[in-house]
C-alpha cells in the first residue's frame, strides 16, 4: 500500500468513526500537527505510534506498515493556489527577508532547521473574530567554517 | 526617495550608530518584525512611528516620507534560493496541507489572514543548540455564502 | 464521492432536468455565482442549502455530502488559455496597478478581501450589443502595525 | 519622453499639487479608473483630455504628448506578488470557470470584451468594515461561424 | 460524450468514408477552417449545421450534441513543438511588433478581434514550390475612454 | 550602432518628418510589413533599399549600416502580454491544430515556411466596424525521406 | 492504432527478430536515421517503404497504416534530462551563436532548414576511444524581402 | 577586460580589417568553428594561438589575455528564439530519441561527449539551393559500472 | 517489462527477503551506489551481474532482462522538493562556482565527467551526531581546441 | 562594499599577486573550498581569518569587512548552463533517489545537512587521465516526531 492509498484509507476511517485529528493524535501519543502530516503522507511514524494509531482507527495492517515507510516529500505546485496555503507562501515572500535579518542579528550566520523542527496550531478566541496561532520551533544551525 | 534607496539609507544609519533592530523598534514603539519589514520596504509606517524612527536613526526627511508610502510587495524568486528563506518555503510545501486540514477542522471553511496578521521571532536558549521560535497570529476569515 | 465526480453528477442532472443555474440557485436560496462555484467544486455549502439543492436536482446523498466538504482550490494553468477567462486575467494585468493606486487613495494601505467577498454577473441589454456586468464586493482589510 | 518617465512626472506633479485621482479625472473629463490607467501608461488619451489633464497638473508638453502615444501593455510577473493584485488573480482562478458557465448560459458562446470595456471602483461604507465595490462592464462578443 | 471523444469519433468516420474537410464543410454549409476547428473541439456549431454535418458523417446523436456544447479552449504547450505550429508562433514573435505598429497607424489604438474573426487557408500553385496562403479577417476593436 | 539604437533613430526621424510606414516603404521600394520589420530590427535590408530608406528619412550613415546587419531575432515574453499581440498568439493556440490538419490534407506532410514568407496587412472598411485583413503567404516545404 | 502503440509494436517485433535499425532501414530502402525516426513516430513513411518495412518486421496492417499518418511532433521536456540528449542541447547552447555567425558569413541572412534536411550517424573507430560522427545536411533558406 | 568586452573588441577589429572568420582561424592555426566560439567568449585559447590571433587583428593586450581566461558558458533563453538557432533546437527535439537509439545500438550504453568534441560547418553548392553541412565528431563515453 | 515495473518488482522482492542494498550489491559484485541506481532504473547492468542479482532476489526473467536495457534518464522536478534531494541541489547552487574555480585552477579548462564517474556513500560515526560521507570520483575531461 | 565588488577586488588582487586559492586558504587558516566560497560571496568569514586573508592579499579594509557580512545566497539559473556545473546538477538528478534510498537504509528517516557540512576537492593522478575527487561530509539530521 503506497502513501496515497494509505491517506485515503485513513480519511475514510476517520470520517466513519467521526473522530478529530486531536483524538487521533492522542491515540498515537503525538502532537496534532505531526500526526496529521504523517497521515497525509509527509512524515513517517515509529512502529509504536503507528500501531496505536492503527488500532484506534481500525486500519488494515498494510496501512500501518505504510505509515512507517520513508516518505518522498513532493508538492505539485511551485506557487500554491489554494487560498489558505497561498497566504503562507505570501508570508514567506513578504516576511522572509525580515526573518533572515532578525535571525542573523539574534543568532549569527545560519538557518532555522526545517528537520529538527516542530509546529503547533491553536485557536485564539476573540470577539472581533477568532484567530489562528501558528508556533514554529526549529533548531538554529550555524554555518561553520572548515 | 524610493523604497530601495530608503532601505540602503536605513541600513547605513543602523550600522553607523551600531544599534539593533530591537532598539530601532523600541524607538518607533512597534514590534521588531513589523519595524524591520517596514525598513526593508515591505510595509508602510504611520506618520508618528515614522518620525520617531527617523529621529532615532537621524534619517533625512525624504527617508521618513518614504517609510510612509504604500509599498509594492514584490519578490524576485518564485522558489527562494537563500537557505534560510528556502527552509520556510519547504515548511509551507511539507506542512501546508496539514495546516489546511487542521484549520478547517478547528475553524470551518476559511483562511488565516496574512493582512490582519502579526509575527514574532524569539530565541529559545537550549544546551543542545539554541532554537528559533516563530509565532504567527492571523485572523480567521470564514468563507461566507451569498 | 470527490468534488470532480460531484460536478459531473450535477451537470448531468442539470442537463436532464433542463434547469438553469438561476433556478438551481433559487432552490438553494443563494446567489447564482456562489451556487455555481460550489457546484463546480470551488466553494462548500452549508447543510441546509446543500440539502435543498440536492432535492431540487434529485442528487444522490453522496453528492449532497460532497457539496459540504471543504474544497482544495486549484487551477491548472498559471496563464489561462480559454479566451473568456484570459480576458479576465488580462484585465488584472492591465488594470491591477490602477486598482491598487485607487484603493490605496480611497481606503489607505490594505487590500480587497477575496474571502469576505461576493460577486454578481448580470446582462445589460444594449442595441449596439448586450453587455456583461460584473460586480465584485470585497471587504477592505487594512494593514495594521503591531 | 517615454511612458515610464511620463508616469514619474505625473506622480511628482500630483504629489506636489496634493490632488487626488478623482480631481485629475474631473479635469480630464473622464472616469477615475481610465484616467489613472492612462497616467500609469496602460492606456492612451485623446488630444483634448490630454491637454486638459496636462494643464491641470502643469505638465511639460512632452508628457502631454506621451499621454497620447499608443501604449505597449506589459506586466512583469505572470503571477502577481503584491497582495492586493494577487487577490484579483485569485478571483480569476477561483471564479473564472463560474463566470464562463454563467456568461455562456445568459449570452451563448462568446466572451466579455476587455477592450470595449469600462470599470469603476467605489467605496461602500459599512460599520463592520468598509467595502471595495468593483464594477466591470464589457461588451459581449459572440463567436460567429463562417 | 465530451469533446475529445467527439473528435475521435469524427476522425474515425471521416477516414471510413474517405471524405475531405472541404466535403464535410460543404455538408455543414460552413467554411473549411471553422468546420475543422469545431470538429477538433475548439468551436461550437449551431444546431442546424451540427445536424447536417452529423447526417453526412453518420455520427451518433451524442456526437451531434457534443458539437453544440461550448468548448473550453485549451492548449497544452505554451511554446508549441510541432514544426508546422511553431512556425506560426515564430511569425507572431518576429512580426507581432510590426503588426502592432501598422494596425495602430492604420486604425488608431485598438486590437484585431480574435472572436469576431474568420480565417481561410488556400493553396497557391507555383512551379518553384506550392505556397500556403492564410487570410485572417478580424474586426478592429478600438479602445474607448470612459 | 546596434539595432535598438537604430530603431530609436528611425522612429525619431519618422515622427519629425511626419511620414507613415507606407511612405517609408515606398521610398525603400518594398512592402509596408517588411520595411517596418526591418526598421524594428527584425529583418535586414539589402544595400540599395537601405540607402534609399536612409536618404528619405535623413538617417546618419551608421543607421543605414545597421539596417544591413543580420538581426538576432529575439522576443522577451514567451506568452505576449500586449492585447494586440496576445490575440495573434491566441489564434495560433486555437486554430493551430486546424491549420495543421488542413495544410496536411491539401499539401501532404510538411510545413509552411516562415522564412520564404511574406505578409500584408490591409484595412477593410465596413459600416459595422472596419476590419483588419492579414494575408500570409509561405512556401510549402515537404518533409522528404532520405 | 496511434503512433505510440505503433512504436511499441515495432520495438517488440525488432527485439523478437533480433534485427538492427540498419537492417530495418535496408528493408525499407531508406537511411537508418530517417527510418528510426519514423518508427519512433516523429516522421511519416510513403506507402512503399511502409509496406516493405512492415513485411520485413511482420507488422500488423494497422501498424503499417500508422507509419503513414502525419506525426504531431512533440517533446515533453523543454530542457532534456537524458545525458545523451542533453549533450546535444548543450552543443546548441554553446555553439549556436557560432553557427549563426559562420552560416551568415558563408551564405548571407537566412537559416539552415530542419525540414529539407538529412542526418547520418556513423562510428569512427579510434584506439583512444571510438567516436560518434554526426553529419547534418540542410538546405540554406535565404530571407527575401518583399 | 571581460569576455563581453573582448567579443565587442574583436568584432570591431574584424569589421575594420574586413577579414573573415576563416582568415582569423588561419592566423590562429585553428578551425573556424573553434576560433569563432572562442572569439564569442564560449571557449578559451592557449597562449600561442591567442597571441597569433591578437597580432593578426591588432588587439590590445587585455583582449589577448581575455581570450585565455576560462569562460562561464551561459545562454539566456532556455528555448532559443532566433530562427537559425531554434531550428537546431528543433532537430534535437525531433531527432534526439533517434540519435539515442542508434548510438546505443552502435556503441552500447553511453553518450557522445560535448567536451572531447569538434565541429565543422561547410557549404555544399547545389543548383536547387546551396546546403549547409554540419559535421560533429565527439568521443563516445561508455557508462561503466563500479 | 519496463523499468518502472522492474523497480517495483525489485523493491517487493527486497522487502520480502529482508535484504539490504549492500547485500544485493555484494550478490551482483558491484558497489552499493551503482547497484541501487540500476535497480531504480537509472543505469543498466551487464548480463553477468544482472543474472547474479536476479538469482539472489529470485526475480522473474523479464526483470533480469529489464535490468540490461538502456535507461532513459529522466527526473520530473527541475527543482527537487524532497528535503534530502533538495539539499544536494542547494549544494550545487551554493558551491558550484567554487568547484568550477578550484577545478580550473587544479586541472585547467575542462569538466568532471558524470559518465566516467563513480560515487560512494558512507556513514561516519560521531558522538555529536553521525555524518554522511559522499565521495565522487570523475574523470577530468579537458577542453581541446581543433 | 557589497559582496559582488568584494569578489572583484579579491580576484584582481589574486591575479596581481599570482597566488593560488590554496595559498589564500593557508593564509586564512581554512580549507580551499570554504575560503573560495567566502571569496565568491557565498559564505562569511569570522574576523580573524578575514583579517589574515585581507593582509595576505593586501585588501582594502572595506573588503575585509564585506567578507564578514552575512551572504544572501542566490543563483540565477534554476538549471545551470555551464557544463562543469550542469554535470553536478545531472548527478543530483540521476543519483538523487539512489542517495535517498541508501541514506535512509543506513541512517533512518532524515537528511544530510547542507549547513553542518564540509567539502574537499582533490586531484587524483591517473595515467588514463587525471580524476577529480569530491568529498562531501554532512551531519545526518534525523526527523523526530513531536
Image: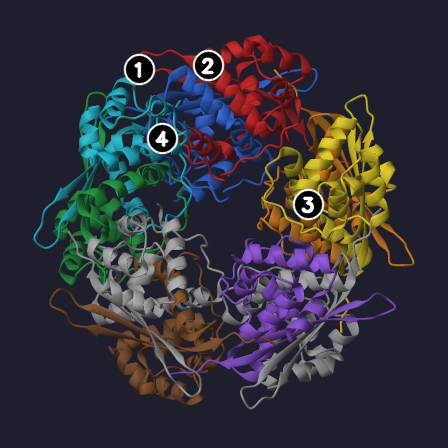
Chain colours: A cyan, B green, D brown, E purple, G yellow, H orange, I red, J blue
Disc number lying in front (1 or 4): 4
How far apart in space, not on screen, are marks 1 and 2 (Cα)? 35 Å
Count the marks: how many?
A: 4
Q: Residue furthest right?
A: H127
Q: Earlier in the sequence, mark 1 or mark 2?
A: 2
Contact between marks 3 and 1 (CB within 8 A): the answer is no
Measure how far apart labels 4 and 2 are at the Cα level.
Answer: 20 Å
| Residues behind callouts 1 and 4 on a single chain | no
Compared to residue G142, the image places residue H145 above or below, namely: above
- Residue G67 x, y percent position in the rendering: 75, 46
Q: CA distance from mark 3 to mark 1?
A: 62 Å
Residue that mark 4 sits on: A6
Q: Nearer the viewer, residue B34 or A54?
A: A54
Give the number of the mark in front: 3 or 4.
3
Return the chain for callout 1: I
The residue that disc 1 covers is I128
Where residue A14 sits: x, y (%)?
25, 34
E79, B13: nearer the viewer: E79
Amino acid at each position: 500500500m503506497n502513501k496515497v492509498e494509505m491517506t485515503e484509507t485513513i480519511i475514510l476511517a476517520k470520517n466513519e468513526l467521526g473522530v478529530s485529528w486531536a483524538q487521533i493524535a492522542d491515540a498515537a501519543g503525538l502532537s496534532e500537527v505531526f500526526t496529521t502530516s504523517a497521515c497525509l503522507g509527509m512524515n513517517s511514524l515509529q512502529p509504536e505510534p503507528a500501531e496505536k494509531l492503527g488500532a484506534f482507527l481500525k486500519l488494515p495492517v498494510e496501512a500501518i506498515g505504510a505509515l512507517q515507510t520513508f516518505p518522498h516529500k513532493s508538492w505539485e505546485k511551485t506557487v500554491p493556489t489554494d487560498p489558505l496555503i497561498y497566504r503562507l507562501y505570501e508570508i514567506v515572500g513578504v516576511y522572509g527577508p525580515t526573518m533572515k535579518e532578525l535571525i542573523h542579528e539574534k543568532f549569527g550566520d545560519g538557518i532555522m532547521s526545517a528537520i529538527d523542527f516542530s509546529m503547533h496550531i491553536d485557536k485564539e478566541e476573540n470577539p472581533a473574530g477568532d484567530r489562528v496561532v501558528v508556533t514554529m520551533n526549529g533548531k538554529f544551525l550555524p554555518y561553520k567554517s572548515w
